[in-house]
Amino acid sequence: MRAAERALLLAAALVMAVAGVATAQSPETRLRRLERQADEQRHRERLLQQDRDALQRELAALQEEAVAAVEAQARAATRVEAARARRAALVPLEAELAGEAEAARARLARLAAALERLARTPREALLLRAEAPVDALRAGRLLAHAVPAVDAHARAVAVALDDHRAARAALAGEEEALAAALAAEEAGRARLEEMIARRGRLMAALDAERMSVAMRLEMLGREMGGLRELLERLAARRAEEERARAAAAAAADQEREAGERARQASAEARPFAEARGRARPPAQGRLVANWGQADAGGTASRGMAFEAVPEATIVSPWHGTVAYAGPFRGYGVILIVDSGDGYHWFVTGFGRLDVAPGQPVRAGEPVGQAPGAGAARPVVYVELRRNGQPVDPAPWVALPNGKVGG
Protein backbone atom coordinates (compact mmCIF):
# COMPACT_ATOMS: atom_id res chain seq x y z
CA MET A 1 0.00 0.00 0.00
CA ARG A 2 2.83 2.40 0.87
CA ALA A 3 4.58 1.71 -2.46
CA ALA A 4 1.38 2.60 -4.34
CA GLU A 5 1.01 5.84 -2.40
CA ARG A 6 4.61 6.72 -3.17
CA ALA A 7 4.05 6.06 -6.87
CA LEU A 8 1.12 8.50 -6.82
CA LEU A 9 3.27 11.08 -5.02
CA LEU A 10 6.01 10.66 -7.63
CA ALA A 11 3.52 11.16 -10.47
CA ALA A 12 2.15 14.28 -8.78
CA ALA A 13 5.66 15.64 -8.29
CA LEU A 14 6.42 15.12 -11.99
CA VAL A 15 3.22 16.95 -13.00
CA MET A 16 4.06 19.84 -10.68
CA ALA A 17 7.58 19.99 -12.14
CA VAL A 18 6.23 20.22 -15.72
CA ALA A 19 3.76 22.92 -14.69
CA GLY A 20 6.52 24.84 -12.95
CA VAL A 21 8.72 24.81 -16.06
CA ALA A 22 5.87 26.07 -18.23
CA THR A 23 5.14 29.00 -15.94
CA ALA A 24 7.28 32.13 -16.00
CA GLN A 25 8.79 32.58 -12.54
CA SER A 26 11.31 34.83 -10.89
CA PRO A 27 14.66 33.23 -10.09
CA GLU A 28 13.91 33.37 -6.35
CA THR A 29 10.47 31.67 -6.70
CA ARG A 30 11.80 29.10 -9.10
CA LEU A 31 14.74 28.38 -6.78
CA ARG A 32 12.43 27.82 -3.80
CA ARG A 33 10.20 25.49 -5.83
CA LEU A 34 13.13 23.49 -7.07
CA GLU A 35 14.56 23.25 -3.54
CA ARG A 36 11.24 21.93 -2.22
CA GLN A 37 11.08 19.33 -4.98
CA ALA A 38 14.66 18.27 -4.33
CA ASP A 39 13.94 17.97 -0.58
CA GLU A 40 10.88 15.83 -1.32
CA GLN A 41 12.88 13.54 -3.58
CA ARG A 42 15.69 13.19 -1.06
CA HIS A 43 13.16 12.39 1.65
CA ARG A 44 11.65 9.81 -0.65
CA GLU A 45 15.10 8.38 -1.35
CA ARG A 46 15.77 8.01 2.39
CA LEU A 47 12.45 6.20 2.89
CA LEU A 48 13.22 3.82 0.04
CA GLN A 49 16.67 3.12 1.48
CA GLN A 50 15.12 2.36 4.88
CA ASP A 51 12.68 -0.04 3.24
CA ARG A 52 15.49 -1.74 1.35
CA ASP A 53 17.61 -2.08 4.51
CA ALA A 54 14.66 -3.67 6.32
CA LEU A 55 14.14 -6.09 3.43
CA GLN A 56 17.84 -6.93 3.42
CA ARG A 57 17.70 -7.83 7.13
CA GLU A 58 14.60 -9.98 6.55
CA LEU A 59 16.31 -11.72 3.64
CA ALA A 60 19.41 -12.50 5.75
CA ALA A 61 17.21 -13.93 8.52
CA LEU A 62 15.28 -16.05 6.00
CA GLN A 63 18.55 -17.37 4.56
CA GLU A 64 19.61 -18.41 8.07
CA GLU A 65 16.27 -20.18 8.50
CA ALA A 66 16.71 -21.89 5.13
CA VAL A 67 20.10 -23.27 6.23
CA ALA A 68 18.52 -24.56 9.48
CA ALA A 69 15.61 -26.07 7.51
CA VAL A 70 18.00 -27.99 5.24
CA GLU A 71 19.83 -29.37 8.29
CA ALA A 72 16.52 -30.35 9.96
CA GLN A 73 15.40 -32.04 6.75
CA ALA A 74 18.68 -33.97 6.58
CA ARG A 75 18.25 -35.11 10.20
CA ALA A 76 14.67 -36.26 9.47
CA ALA A 77 15.85 -38.19 6.41
CA THR A 78 18.55 -39.87 8.52
CA ARG A 79 15.93 -40.94 11.08
CA VAL A 80 13.73 -42.40 8.31
CA GLU A 81 16.67 -44.38 6.90
CA ALA A 82 17.54 -45.65 10.41
CA ALA A 83 13.94 -46.81 11.03
CA ARG A 84 13.94 -48.62 7.68
CA ALA A 85 17.24 -50.30 8.52
CA ARG A 86 15.95 -51.45 11.94
CA ARG A 87 12.79 -52.84 10.37
CA ALA A 88 14.79 -54.62 7.65
CA ALA A 89 17.07 -56.17 10.29
CA LEU A 90 14.04 -57.82 11.94
CA VAL A 91 13.01 -59.65 8.75
CA PRO A 92 15.73 -62.41 8.74
CA LEU A 93 15.40 -62.88 12.52
CA GLU A 94 11.64 -63.24 12.12
CA ALA A 95 12.15 -65.85 9.38
CA GLU A 96 14.62 -67.71 11.61
CA LEU A 97 12.12 -67.75 14.49
CA ALA A 98 9.35 -68.92 12.17
CA GLY A 99 11.55 -71.83 11.01
CA GLU A 100 12.44 -72.69 14.59
CA ALA A 101 8.76 -72.63 15.58
CA GLU A 102 7.88 -74.93 12.68
CA ALA A 103 10.68 -77.34 13.66
CA ALA A 104 9.51 -77.37 17.29
CA ARG A 105 5.94 -78.14 16.20
CA ALA A 106 7.18 -80.98 13.95
CA ARG A 107 9.27 -82.45 16.76
CA LEU A 108 6.33 -82.24 19.15
CA ALA A 109 4.15 -83.99 16.58
CA ARG A 110 6.69 -86.82 16.21
CA LEU A 111 6.92 -87.28 20.00
CA ALA A 112 3.15 -87.36 20.32
CA ALA A 113 2.90 -89.95 17.54
CA ALA A 114 5.55 -92.12 19.17
CA LEU A 115 3.75 -91.98 22.53
CA GLU A 116 0.49 -92.84 20.85
CA ARG A 117 2.08 -95.90 19.18
CA LEU A 118 3.50 -97.06 22.53
CA ALA A 119 0.13 -96.59 24.20
CA ARG A 120 -1.62 -98.71 21.56
CA THR A 121 0.97 -101.55 21.60
CA PRO A 122 -0.37 -104.58 23.62
CA ARG A 123 1.71 -105.75 26.53
CA GLU A 124 2.13 -109.16 24.92
CA ALA A 125 3.68 -107.47 21.89
CA LEU A 126 6.17 -105.72 24.12
CA LEU A 127 7.33 -109.14 25.35
CA LEU A 128 8.02 -110.25 21.78
CA ARG A 129 10.24 -107.20 20.91
CA ALA A 130 13.98 -107.57 20.58
CA GLU A 131 14.71 -105.08 23.35
CA ALA A 132 13.82 -105.82 26.96
CA PRO A 133 10.35 -104.67 28.19
CA VAL A 134 12.12 -102.51 30.76
CA ASP A 135 13.90 -100.68 27.94
CA ALA A 136 10.61 -100.08 26.13
CA LEU A 137 9.05 -98.81 29.34
CA ARG A 138 12.03 -96.53 29.95
CA ALA A 139 11.78 -95.15 26.39
CA GLY A 140 8.11 -94.40 26.88
CA ARG A 141 8.81 -92.51 30.08
CA LEU A 142 11.55 -90.48 28.40
CA LEU A 143 9.18 -89.59 25.59
CA ALA A 144 6.50 -88.56 28.08
CA HIS A 145 8.97 -86.29 29.90
CA ALA A 146 10.26 -84.77 26.64
CA VAL A 147 6.83 -83.69 25.38
CA PRO A 148 6.26 -80.87 27.95
CA ALA A 149 9.77 -79.49 27.43
CA VAL A 150 9.38 -79.46 23.64
CA ASP A 151 5.91 -77.95 23.98
CA ALA A 152 7.23 -75.18 26.27
CA HIS A 153 10.04 -74.44 23.82
CA ALA A 154 7.55 -74.24 20.93
CA ARG A 155 5.37 -71.84 22.90
CA ALA A 156 8.37 -69.65 23.80
CA VAL A 157 9.44 -69.51 20.16
CA ALA A 158 5.88 -68.59 19.13
CA VAL A 159 5.79 -65.78 21.73
CA ALA A 160 9.17 -64.46 20.52
CA LEU A 161 7.91 -64.61 16.93
CA ASP A 162 4.78 -62.63 17.86
CA ASP A 163 6.95 -60.07 19.70
CA HIS A 164 9.16 -59.58 16.63
CA ARG A 165 6.14 -59.19 14.39
CA ALA A 166 4.69 -56.60 16.77
CA ALA A 167 8.04 -54.78 16.89
CA ARG A 168 8.24 -54.72 13.10
CA ALA A 169 4.69 -53.33 12.90
CA ALA A 170 5.58 -50.66 15.47
CA LEU A 171 8.67 -49.73 13.46
CA ALA A 172 6.52 -49.46 10.34
CA GLY A 173 4.28 -46.98 12.18
CA GLU A 174 7.32 -45.07 13.40
CA GLU A 175 8.66 -44.98 9.83
CA GLU A 176 5.36 -43.53 8.57
CA ALA A 177 5.41 -40.86 11.28
CA LEU A 178 9.03 -39.96 10.47
CA ALA A 179 8.23 -39.81 6.76
CA ALA A 180 5.34 -37.43 7.53
CA ALA A 181 7.70 -35.28 9.61
CA LEU A 182 10.20 -35.29 6.73
CA ALA A 183 7.47 -34.16 4.33
CA ALA A 184 6.51 -31.37 6.74
CA GLU A 185 10.16 -30.22 6.94
CA GLU A 186 10.38 -30.18 3.15
CA ALA A 187 7.15 -28.20 2.86
CA GLY A 188 8.45 -25.69 5.41
CA ARG A 189 11.69 -25.30 3.47
CA ALA A 190 9.71 -24.75 0.26
CA ARG A 191 7.75 -21.99 2.00
CA LEU A 192 11.00 -20.38 3.15
CA GLU A 193 12.37 -20.47 -0.39
CA GLU A 194 9.19 -18.82 -1.69
CA MET A 195 9.48 -16.10 0.97
CA ILE A 196 13.12 -15.52 -0.01
CA ALA A 197 12.12 -15.25 -3.68
CA ARG A 198 9.31 -12.82 -2.77
CA ARG A 199 11.71 -10.63 -0.76
CA GLY A 200 14.07 -10.64 -3.72
CA ARG A 201 11.31 -9.42 -6.05
CA LEU A 202 10.39 -6.67 -3.58
CA MET A 203 14.03 -5.56 -3.38
CA ALA A 204 14.20 -5.44 -7.19
CA ALA A 205 11.07 -3.26 -7.27
CA LEU A 206 12.53 -0.94 -4.62
CA ASP A 207 15.80 -0.66 -6.55
CA ALA A 208 13.87 0.29 -9.69
CA GLU A 209 11.96 2.92 -7.73
CA ARG A 210 15.18 4.27 -6.20
CA MET A 211 16.68 4.54 -9.69
CA SER A 212 13.62 6.52 -10.78
CA VAL A 213 14.06 8.91 -7.85
CA ALA A 214 17.78 9.23 -8.59
CA MET A 215 17.00 10.13 -12.21
CA ARG A 216 14.50 12.75 -11.02
CA LEU A 217 17.09 14.26 -8.70
CA GLU A 218 19.54 14.34 -11.59
CA MET A 219 16.99 16.17 -13.74
CA LEU A 220 16.39 18.71 -10.96
CA GLY A 221 20.13 19.19 -10.57
CA ARG A 222 20.55 19.89 -14.29
CA GLU A 223 17.61 22.30 -14.22
CA MET A 224 19.16 24.20 -11.34
CA GLY A 225 22.59 24.17 -13.01
CA GLY A 226 22.44 27.87 -13.96
CA LEU A 227 21.75 29.01 -10.39
CA ARG A 228 25.11 29.30 -8.66
CA GLU A 229 23.65 29.95 -5.23
CA LEU A 230 21.50 26.84 -5.46
CA LEU A 231 24.50 24.79 -6.59
CA GLU A 232 26.44 25.95 -3.56
CA ARG A 233 23.56 25.04 -1.27
CA LEU A 234 23.15 21.63 -2.91
CA ALA A 235 26.89 21.00 -2.64
CA ALA A 236 26.86 21.83 1.07
CA ARG A 237 23.76 19.70 1.61
CA ARG A 238 25.25 16.86 -0.36
CA ALA A 239 28.42 16.98 1.70
CA GLU A 240 26.35 16.92 4.88
CA GLU A 241 24.35 13.96 3.63
CA GLU A 242 27.54 12.16 2.61
CA ARG A 243 28.95 12.65 6.09
CA ALA A 244 25.70 11.41 7.62
CA ARG A 245 25.66 8.42 5.26
CA ALA A 246 29.31 7.68 6.01
CA ALA A 247 28.63 7.86 9.75
CA ALA A 248 25.56 5.65 9.35
CA ALA A 249 27.53 3.24 7.16
CA ALA A 250 30.35 3.13 9.73
CA ALA A 251 27.85 2.42 12.51
CA ALA A 252 26.13 -0.21 10.39
CA ASP A 253 29.50 -1.80 9.59
CA GLN A 254 30.39 -1.97 13.27
CA GLU A 255 27.01 -3.50 14.09
CA ARG A 256 27.30 -5.97 11.22
CA GLU A 257 30.85 -6.98 12.19
CA ALA A 258 29.78 -7.57 15.79
CA GLY A 259 26.83 -9.65 14.63
CA GLU A 260 28.94 -11.62 12.17
CA ARG A 261 31.50 -12.46 14.85
CA ALA A 262 28.67 -13.83 16.98
CA ARG A 263 26.98 -15.92 14.24
CA GLN A 264 29.84 -16.93 11.92
CA ALA A 265 30.05 -14.28 9.22
CA SER A 266 30.75 -14.81 5.55
CA ALA A 267 34.22 -15.62 4.27
CA GLU A 268 34.81 -12.07 3.00
CA ALA A 269 34.97 -10.80 6.61
CA ARG A 270 37.37 -13.44 8.00
CA PRO A 271 40.24 -15.70 6.86
CA PHE A 272 39.44 -18.94 5.11
CA ALA A 273 41.51 -20.84 7.69
CA GLU A 274 38.52 -20.65 10.04
CA ALA A 275 36.70 -23.06 7.71
CA ARG A 276 39.01 -25.95 8.69
CA GLY A 277 36.89 -28.77 10.11
CA ARG A 278 33.69 -26.67 9.74
CA ALA A 279 32.89 -26.69 6.01
CA ARG A 280 29.71 -28.53 5.03
CA PRO A 281 29.54 -31.61 2.77
CA PRO A 282 27.65 -30.57 -0.39
CA ALA A 283 24.97 -33.23 0.18
CA GLN A 284 23.88 -35.64 2.89
CA GLY A 285 24.92 -39.17 2.03
CA ARG A 286 27.57 -41.86 2.20
CA LEU A 287 31.18 -40.88 1.40
CA VAL A 288 32.04 -43.09 -1.61
CA ALA A 289 35.35 -41.55 -2.71
CA ASN A 290 37.98 -39.60 -0.78
CA TRP A 291 41.09 -37.67 -1.78
CA GLY A 292 43.62 -39.87 -3.59
CA GLN A 293 41.29 -42.87 -3.88
CA ALA A 294 41.57 -44.56 -7.30
CA ASP A 295 38.44 -44.94 -9.40
CA ALA A 296 37.57 -47.87 -11.71
CA GLY A 297 39.94 -46.49 -14.37
CA GLY A 298 42.82 -46.13 -11.88
CA THR A 299 42.66 -42.30 -11.73
CA ALA A 300 43.21 -40.82 -8.25
CA SER A 301 40.37 -38.67 -6.93
CA ARG A 302 41.16 -34.98 -6.39
CA GLY A 303 38.17 -34.40 -4.11
CA MET A 304 35.37 -36.13 -2.19
CA ALA A 305 32.24 -37.84 -3.59
CA PHE A 306 28.99 -38.42 -1.69
CA GLU A 307 26.22 -40.82 -2.68
CA ALA A 308 22.97 -38.88 -2.15
CA VAL A 309 19.28 -39.70 -2.39
CA PRO A 310 17.41 -38.65 -5.57
CA GLU A 311 16.55 -34.92 -5.62
CA ALA A 312 18.72 -34.32 -2.52
CA THR A 313 19.39 -30.69 -1.59
CA ILE A 314 22.91 -29.53 -2.51
CA VAL A 315 24.38 -26.80 -0.27
CA SER A 316 27.35 -24.43 -0.40
CA PRO A 317 30.34 -25.91 1.50
CA TRP A 318 31.40 -22.52 2.91
CA HIS A 319 30.68 -18.81 2.77
CA GLY A 320 31.69 -16.98 -0.38
CA THR A 321 30.58 -15.59 -3.73
CA VAL A 322 29.41 -17.59 -6.73
CA ALA A 323 32.21 -17.29 -9.31
CA TYR A 324 30.64 -19.63 -11.89
CA ALA A 325 27.33 -21.49 -12.17
CA GLY A 326 26.35 -23.50 -15.23
CA PRO A 327 27.43 -26.22 -17.68
CA PHE A 328 31.15 -26.63 -18.35
CA ARG A 329 32.62 -28.86 -21.08
CA GLY A 330 32.19 -32.55 -20.19
CA TYR A 331 31.58 -31.97 -16.47
CA GLY A 332 27.87 -31.22 -16.71
CA VAL A 333 26.52 -28.42 -14.50
CA ILE A 334 29.12 -27.12 -12.01
CA LEU A 335 29.26 -24.51 -9.27
CA ILE A 336 32.41 -22.58 -8.28
CA VAL A 337 32.33 -20.67 -4.97
CA ASP A 338 35.11 -18.14 -4.27
CA SER A 339 35.74 -18.24 -0.49
CA GLY A 340 38.66 -15.80 -0.51
CA ASP A 341 42.36 -16.23 0.32
CA GLY A 342 42.80 -17.96 -3.06
CA TYR A 343 40.42 -20.83 -2.20
CA HIS A 344 37.65 -22.03 -4.54
CA TRP A 345 35.10 -24.83 -4.10
CA PHE A 346 34.11 -26.87 -7.18
CA VAL A 347 30.80 -28.78 -6.82
CA THR A 348 29.28 -31.10 -9.47
CA GLY A 349 26.35 -33.53 -9.60
CA PHE A 350 23.50 -31.04 -10.07
CA GLY A 351 20.14 -31.86 -11.52
CA ARG A 352 19.10 -28.26 -10.93
CA LEU A 353 21.11 -25.13 -10.06
CA ASP A 354 19.44 -22.29 -8.12
CA VAL A 355 22.17 -19.61 -7.86
CA ALA A 356 23.81 -17.19 -10.30
CA PRO A 357 27.33 -15.70 -10.65
CA GLY A 358 28.00 -12.81 -8.28
CA GLN A 359 25.50 -14.04 -5.70
CA PRO A 360 26.76 -14.29 -2.09
CA VAL A 361 26.14 -17.64 -0.37
CA ARG A 362 26.53 -18.88 3.18
CA ALA A 363 27.81 -22.21 4.47
CA GLY A 364 24.99 -24.74 4.25
CA GLU A 365 22.74 -22.49 2.11
CA PRO A 366 20.78 -24.44 -0.56
CA VAL A 367 22.26 -23.87 -4.02
CA GLY A 368 20.57 -26.59 -6.07
CA GLN A 369 19.24 -30.13 -6.21
CA ALA A 370 20.58 -33.54 -7.23
CA PRO A 371 18.98 -35.41 -10.17
CA GLY A 372 15.78 -37.39 -9.63
CA ALA A 373 15.34 -41.13 -9.39
CA GLY A 374 17.25 -43.15 -11.99
CA ALA A 375 19.22 -46.35 -12.50
CA ALA A 376 21.65 -45.42 -9.70
CA ARG A 377 21.79 -43.01 -6.81
CA PRO A 378 23.20 -39.58 -7.74
CA VAL A 379 26.78 -38.76 -6.71
CA VAL A 380 27.67 -35.21 -5.62
CA TYR A 381 31.38 -34.35 -5.94
CA VAL A 382 33.27 -31.52 -4.23
CA GLU A 383 36.82 -30.32 -4.88
CA LEU A 384 38.83 -27.61 -3.08
CA ARG A 385 41.49 -25.62 -4.93
CA ARG A 386 43.99 -23.06 -3.68
CA ASN A 387 45.39 -20.69 -6.27
CA GLY A 388 44.12 -23.06 -8.97
CA GLN A 389 45.75 -26.22 -7.56
CA PRO A 390 43.68 -29.08 -6.00
CA VAL A 391 44.17 -29.65 -2.26
CA ASP A 392 42.78 -32.37 0.00
CA PRO A 393 39.33 -31.10 1.17
CA ALA A 394 39.00 -33.76 3.89
CA PRO A 395 40.60 -31.67 6.72
CA TRP A 396 38.13 -28.86 5.96
CA VAL A 397 34.84 -30.79 5.60
CA ALA A 398 32.91 -31.78 8.73
CA LEU A 399 31.07 -35.08 8.15
CA PRO A 400 27.64 -35.88 9.77
CA ASN A 401 29.30 -38.11 12.39
CA GLY A 402 31.02 -35.02 13.83
CA LYS A 403 34.42 -35.86 12.33
CA VAL A 404 36.29 -34.27 9.49
CA GLY A 405 36.90 -36.19 6.30
CA GLY A 406 40.58 -36.82 6.86
Image: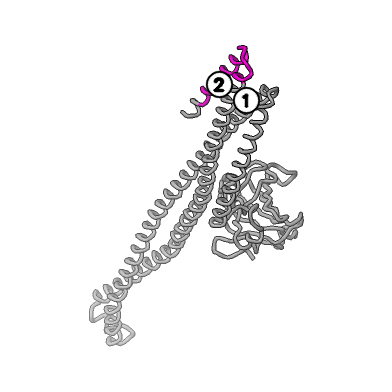
| Residue at horizontal 35 percent and vertical 70 percent from the top | 104
Q: Give, as a three-letter code, the residue at label 1.
A: Arg
Foreground of the two, 354 or 160:
354
| Residue at horizontal 65 percent and vertical 64 percent from the top | 395
Range drawn in magenta = 6-30
Q: Which residue does the numbered mark 2 point to in the structure image? A: 13
Q: Which mark is residue 216?
A: 1
**Percent position of residue 41, x then y:** 57, 28
| Residue 374 shows up from this direction | no
Q: Is residue 370 above or below residue 108?
A: above
SS label for mark 1: helix
Question: What predominant SS class does the magenta segment belong to?
Answer: helix
**Percent position of residue 239, x then y:** 65, 38
The answer to whether residue 231 is magenta is no
Q: Residues within 10 Å of mark 2 (few under 14, many from 20)?
A: some
Q: Which mark is residue 62?
A: none
Q: Give, as a three-letter code, the residue at label 2.
A: Ala
**Total marks in image:** 2
Quadrant of the drawing holding the C terminus? bottom right
SS label for mark 2: helix
* Mark 1 → mark 2, Cα distance in angstroms: 10 Å
| Residue 183 shows up from this direction | yes
C-beta proximity under 8 Å, tags 1 and 2: yes
| Residue at horizontal 59 percent and vertical 27 percent from the top | 38
Q: Is residue 264 above or below residue 18?
A: below
